[in-house]
Image (cartoon, rainbow, N blue to C red):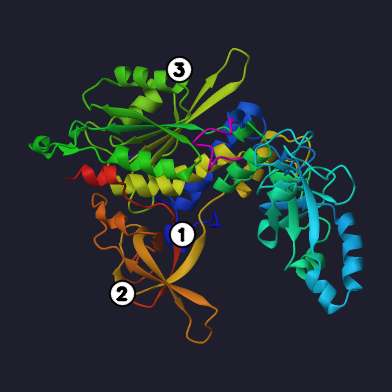
Amino acid sequence: KTQLTPLSSELPCLSLSTMSMHRMVPVPEALETVLTETAKSLWFGSGSASTQVSVSTSSSDLVGQISAADIRVPSPGYPTYNSSIMDGYAVKTSDLVEMKRLYDNMDEKERGDFRMEFVLEGKVFAGDINTASISCDDNNGSSNGVYPTAVYVTTGAVVPNEYDAVIPVEDTTQETEKGHKCIIDDKVASVLATTKPWTWIRPIGCDIAADSIVLSKGETIQPVHMALLAQCGVDQIQVNYLPRVGILSTGNELLPSTNTDQCQNGKIPDANRPLLLSQLNTYGNCKPHDLGIISDDDSIEMLSDKLKNGLWDDGIDVIISTGGISMGEKDNMEQVFVEGMGGKIHFGRMNMKPGKPTTFITIDKEGSNGTIRRKLVFALPGNPVSASVCTELLVRPCLDLLNQGVETSEVVNSLDEQVFIRHAVDNASVHDELMATLTKDVKLDKGRPEYHRVSLQRAQTPHDKLQYSYHATSTGVQRSSRVLSLRSADGLMMLPRGGPLGCGQDVAKKRTGIPYLAVSIIFICDEVWNSFQ
């Protein structure tokens, strides 16, 4: 996990602009603030972990969600009946004991003439439910005690209770003209030697024993769990609530259409919403909702009323807005969230590149019963790269915490708010911080630390073929508007601030080891590419 302590190059500093009243906070401090306020949201909501909801196991979007309870296999386990593994004949191994005794005492010629014969008592096919009255139309000899009986079974069929082994059909012949007999002649020795109780039978509960846990509380549901739930006959399960996230773009320059004929005279396609909606969809920890585009010319009152409806009436838990949060004349989203909606700013600038104007706000509302309902707002910069990177760094850990909840059983039975919040923050899921070496020199920014998009390659170390090292290559020009810098990125290299006020160097040299954050989902979906066509 990334340590929530400032890097030496990320010392707290004030914005140099006299227009901003917000201190620029280091990214680790911003992340801890987000996790702290998110934990408070959980505390206000239930005083414990994430809310639980019941979902049908036939739901197509169940994979990726988190189970809220242990799922145990009901008795008698799976399979629920003795099932044939092969097409063949079910027999009683007690009948084979006498045959083997006789066969072992024969000379070579007698063994060559010896045949094992069974009267075919009936047939059971896969899917047949009732095996109590199995019979053949012409069951000659089965009732005179001369020959032992057998039942023809197909793969997956129920093996009748009194039978305890199956002889594969390829080891036998069937003589229907002689009373439906199953005969073994040239494979007697191998059949007698290999056929033991439960040969070619799956006994009741052999695949999954009764009371086994097939899905644990807190476990992320995978495709294999869908098969296990089906085998166990489970049609409803409890899962952790998926927070609803509203995605909002702002700006008069944005067009919802991807028609490039309209992209002139200062108009551009809105790439942020398809990017963030797709990015959030891959996380599996939320339900993204498209809130559309709002104009810079709408009044603060009009925008506030619109967003209030989404938050409180439509059940949106988290809002991500892009644009309108910097210091331009029409950048009014801070006023909308704070003055119009009663929000509280926890930080309004981050000491990083890209994403400096990122603002985090909470909006609390007291219910009629005295409980507090909290909404979380991430007001992100309008450039798509800044929005994507800040969503990955801040929003994803927030949503993980909301979705996963807080496991408190290991702490104490009765928690107070501060203990709960500290425990939540300390155990939150954050990005892994690893080390990689640069493949080329990279110029350092002299104003802020940079989360530089890189592609990673794994290579064996020269002295130990079992050890690996990682090499990072810049994805090119890192402008926050240049979406191509995300296309091949699978990591964010944490470059220090350069120059005399930073690390003292202007360039990170080739082969220098630099920490990076492993990012599994920095990509551009087809919808985003299409918006530039």
Q: Position of residue 365 (x, y in %)?
A: 52, 20
Circle 2/circle 1 CB separation < 8 Å = no
What secondary structure is marked by label 3?
Answer: helix
- Residue identifier under label 1: 518
Q: Which stretch appears magenta?
A: 56-67
Q: Residues within 10 Å of mark 1 (few under 14, many from 20)?
A: some
Task: Tell me how far mark 1 sits from mark 3, CA to CA.
Answer: 37 Å
Task: Tell me how far mark 2 sits from mark 1, CA to CA.
Answer: 19 Å
- Residue identifier under label 3: 313
What secondary structure is marked by label 2?
Answer: loop
Q: Main secondary structure of the magenta part?
A: loop
Q: Position of residue 109 (x, y in %)?
A: 82, 77
Please report whichever mark, 2 or 1, sits nearer to the chain's N-terminal start.
2
**In percent of the image, x 18 and y 37: which residue is there?**
258
- Residue identifier under label 2: 440
Q: Quadrant of the N terminus?
A: bottom right
Q: Position of residue 388 (x, y in %)?
A: 35, 47
Circle 2/circle 3 CB separation < 8 Å = no
Please report whichever mark, 2 or 3, sits nearer to the chain's N-terminal start.
3
Q: Quadrant of the C terminus?
A: top left
Identify which residue, 428 or 336, lies in the foreground. 428
**In percent of the image, x 80 and y 57: which residue is there?**
117
Circle 1/circle 3 CB separation < 8 Å = no
